[in-house]
Amino acid sequence: MSYAEAVAQATGPGQMFELVPYTVSEVTYKVFKNAPQSLRDFYAFGRMHGDKPFVVYEDQRRSYAETMAESDAFAAALVDHFGIKKGDRVAVAMRNYPEWVISFLAITSIGAINVSMNAWWTEDEMDYALEDSGATLLIADPKRAEIARDSAKRLGCRILVAHADGPIEGAELWEDVVVPGKPLPDVTIDPEDDATILYTSGTTGRPKGAVSPHRALVNSLMGFASRMAIDPLWRPEDEVMDPPENPATILAIPLFHVTGCVPVMLGCLIAGSKLVIMHKWDPGKALELIERERITSFIGVPTQSIDMLQHPRFSEFDTSSLLVVGGGGAPPPPALMKQVNSDFKAARPGFGYGMTETNALGPGIGGADAIAKPSSAGRVPACMEVDIRDAGTFEKLPVGERGEIWFKGPNLIRGYWNKPEATAETIVDGWLRSGDIGHVDEDGFIYVDDRLKDMVLRGGENIYCAEVEAAIYEHPAVHEAAVFGVPHARLGEEVAAAVLPRDGETLTVEELQEFLAGKLAPFKVPTVISIRRDPIPRNPAGKFLKRELRAELTDA
């Protein structure tokens, strides 16, 4: 059976993953007929798993039943204590803690909108997102509560602190608000009601809030799950993996990123997988947890897989429980596919090409395909369509020709919060412009060849050059600044900048980095900076020649 025939059979009438047409705002998608209507309904999967272990964090262990009960009690506190209503925005700013998971379940169960805040943000970045989203409540860990305290006070946003050792000025404490045993409030949620806002780096200097309705999230989750039904129909028998009896996933990436939140955290609820939370990335600690918790799935950015494989004690740990090692967030080096396949006893590579705007769902590749076509991003899921289009005319290009990659599917965001122009630029007639240049081969495999957006992809973090340039230009000594990426062996790319000071002004690399540290999250601050004496080279249209600058610094 061919791949196309397998998709047709698994998504045909009467099947669990049956696809049917669905029209919203005059755009017709293919949706999963049996998908839950909302995340609140989707959480029924979690309630079915009862006493099975769900959230593991250091020495804390919560079963599915305990987690859902605490989520219900917190949902009641949101409604009764904080007055949160359907459509209200509730921001979450913390590192990976069990309370992040519980907060997300509770917020989306009552029809409120979960606003995921990057835990690396500075006070200025947090202030912008709180004001832009209009959040009325911020749920934070102590450090993030301190960073956001003045902004929250100015905006009239209340603060609830989780994982605190004692009282926090200007905030209430989790344990003082959540009353165990309180039932989940009764709320009706429509598939088109907004569920999440995830902030992405901005092309014009400020982050954009990507807004997803419940329909997008549940269809993304069904899209990931559908692969388990499609693969056995067309792959050779010796390539098909049986589902593990006790699935366990390690959370090695931030929950505030779409991959950590959707396919990893929410994906656990379908299979009843144990979610082992890492507070921060440490490859040695990850290997310890894989052995101790018998982890079956590792999903992260390619850098993390490389970190584990290159760890000096890698061979000392038992990683035989792993069945899949992969993830997304950045293109994996082709050599990594083969190394995963050879160095892990049972695991096979499985990487995907998703975006915040697609709720992480997108082309995926694994198993024998990853070895045969290691430079490909894979095939699109059953519910999605892909076009390769001319970046100027938007005309569809034939197989093999390079153009901008466009996606269509029920998993896409509905747009950017309060940014209709950015929405119209990115989403055209229901199609998402990825900003990546690529092509499709005769077998339907997608290849990402280049980047249309002026962006640096550093260890899975998208950094728009315009945002960093805008911060650099705030320095009074700066006359010109161009930001771009340079290759990095571990992170893929690192942020670099060419800077020309004003006449008569002096500026050092250290002074500029110190200045930016108060304005940008640490991962956005350039680590490679060239302070120039001559004007930065431009083309006839006046644009900086960033390819030349990149080559110049790379050679240096």
Image: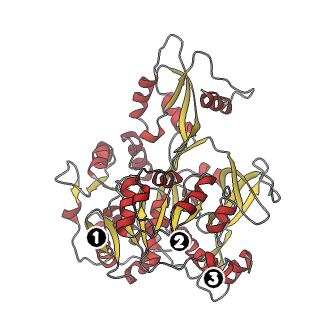
- In the rendering, at what x and y percent does residue 378 appear? 66, 63
Q: Mark 3 or mark 1, which has the lower sequence index?
A: 3
- Quickly name the residue at label 1: 61
The residue nearer to you, when weighing 253 against 34, is 253
- In the rendering, at what x and y percent does residue 184 appear? 32, 77
Q: Residue at x 23, y 68 (%)?
A: 178
Tag 2–tag 1 contact (CB < 8 Å): no
Mark 2 or 1: in front is: 1
The residue nearer to you, when weighing 200 against 296, is 296
Which residue appears farthest toward the front when viewing the image?
Answer: 316
- In the rendering, at what x and y percent does residue 502 appear? 53, 16
Q: Is residue 499 above or below residue 277?
A: above
Regarding mark 3 in the picture, which secondary structure is present there? Answer: loop
**Neighbour class for label 2 at 10 Å: few (<14), some, many (≥20)?**
many
Q: Amino acid at mark 2?
A: Leu
- Quickly name the residue at label 2: 221
Q: CA distance from mark 2 to mark 1?
A: 25 Å
Regarding mark 2 in the picture, which secondary structure is present there? Answer: helix
Which residue appears farthest toward the top when viewing the image?
Answer: 504
Left or right: residue 159 compared with residue 24 = left
Q: CA distance from mark 2 to mark 3?
A: 14 Å
**Residue 85 visible in this rendered orientation of the protein:** no
Q: Amino acid at mark 3?
A: Glu
Q: Mark 2 or mark 3, which has the lower sequence index?
A: 3
- In the rendering, at what x and y percent does residue 96 appear? 36, 57
Q: Residue at x 37, y 81 (%)?
A: 47
Q: Amino acid at mark 1?
A: Arg
Which residue appears farthest toward the right when viewing the image?
Answer: 398
- Quickly name the residue at label 3: 18
Which quarter shows the C terminus? top right
**Neighbour class for label 3 at 10 Å: few (<14), some, many (≥20)?**
many
